[in-house]
Amino acid sequence: MGVFALFCGGQAAAFAQNAAELIEQAHECDNMYTLGPERSQQKALGLYQAALEAGADEKQRLHILYRMAQLYGSAYELQKGEKPDFPKAIELYERIIDSYPPEEPLVFKAMVSIGDHYTTLWEFEKALKWHKKALQYDTGPMAEELNTLKNKEMPRMQFTPDGSRPEPPTEEQLLELKKQHKRARLLEKSLRKIKRYQEFAVDQVAYSAGLIDPLRAHGELRAVIDRHSGTFIAERAAERLKENMDRMPRLWEPKEDFPQPGNASLQPGGASASGISQTKHSIETPSDKVPVLTRQKVSLEPDTPGKAQENKHPAKEPRAPPLGYLSVSVIGAAGLIIVLLAAVIIRKKTSCKE
């Protein structure tokens, strides 16, 4: 039995080492970690998948799933013929959400990323759903635990019965204190990241709802404020609501040229459907966003100065002549006809007299 356990332990260690080596090899091809000639999304994805199959531990598995999802949803450094696979990216993000506890910050990042991908795909209702889902988790218990750990004191020195020499804390007490400090640092770091992702989710709720209808954004932000009253989420939503109300009068101002559905600026505010908040309070700008493909006609001919100028300023159709110009032309023609008829009549009369 002992030999079998030793064998299994050796196998597990070998698998862990193999997974770590495969992750390092994947980093050499992953454009997030290298800009060298070996970078290739397909090679990196293959190595990450091999590391998963080689028995990666929970921490390694989280890193692999998250990075694979980013690669599938990214348009950066794609080779010829490759394109982002948003459904696959969303599937991997959902695996992270289903496999890890909510106190893991990447769970919230995965929710926001799913919403961003649905925004890029113009599925704004689904995007709104996922951004609102990132706001549902209550971080209050985590904050209370952190506060309790911070308020715990160092074990006091215990004096001997005769009061001659204080006794130092025991090894068990020091070990417990070390664990508490480690847990406190982890909670503090996690809460800071979760707050950043949830604030960004509030921005995206306003943005996604605004792409559906500006009045919808107003209602959704009101609901967020009521549901999360007294928290930083409600404060963030109040800021977005004020910006939305300040922008409302400009929505009805007459404009010469209204944007078409395929243009980058889908509505007032000028933000494209890429899931990136353009407010001054934006927390971060994800680097793996893909711009929305427009439905405008694009010339496939090589770029030349003439062609570029032609595409930039398309030729306008000829305008109809003014009404006054048409009236003068008609009167002039009628006058000419009358003069000609008078000349013919006079000539005929002269001929008759002769």
Image: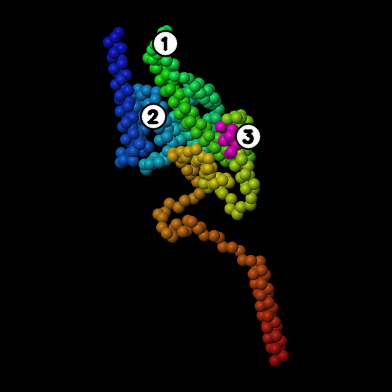
Kind of residue at badge 1: Gly
x and y, in percent, of residue 224 in the image: 60, 32
How would you rate the neighbour count of disc 3 (Cα within 10 Å): few for under 14, some for 14-19, many for 20 or more? some
Foreground residue, 216 or 302? 216
Label 1: few (<14), some or many (≥20) within 10 Å? few
Residue 184, percent across and down? 45, 24
Question: Who's the residue at 30% across and 18% down the image?
Answer: 11
Whether residue 33 is visible to the viewer of this picture, yes or no, is: yes
At mark 3, the secondary structure is helix
Which one is nearer the viewer's eye here, 338 or 125? 125
Give the alpha-carbon distance from disc 3 to disc 2, as whole Å: 38 Å
Left or right of residue 260, residue 301 in this image: left
Q: Nearer the viewer, mark 1 or mark 2?
A: 1
**Which amino acid does the dot numbered 2 rest on?**
Ile
Q: Can residue 208 be seen?
A: no
- The amino acid type of the residue labelled 3 equals Arg
Image side of residue 33 versus residue 254, left or right = left
Q: Which residue is mark 3?
A: 222
In this view of the protein, which residue sits in the foreground, 259 or 297? 259
The image shows residue 215, relative to residue 162, as above or below, that is below
Residue drawn where x is 30% and y is 8% of the image: 1
Q: Which residue is mark 2?
A: 64
Disc 3 vs disc 2: which is toward the camera? 3
How far across and down, in percent of the image, does residue 27 sit? 34, 34
Numbered range of the magenta stretch: 232-240
Q: Which residue is mark 1?
A: 163
Residue 280 inside the magenta-drawn segment: no
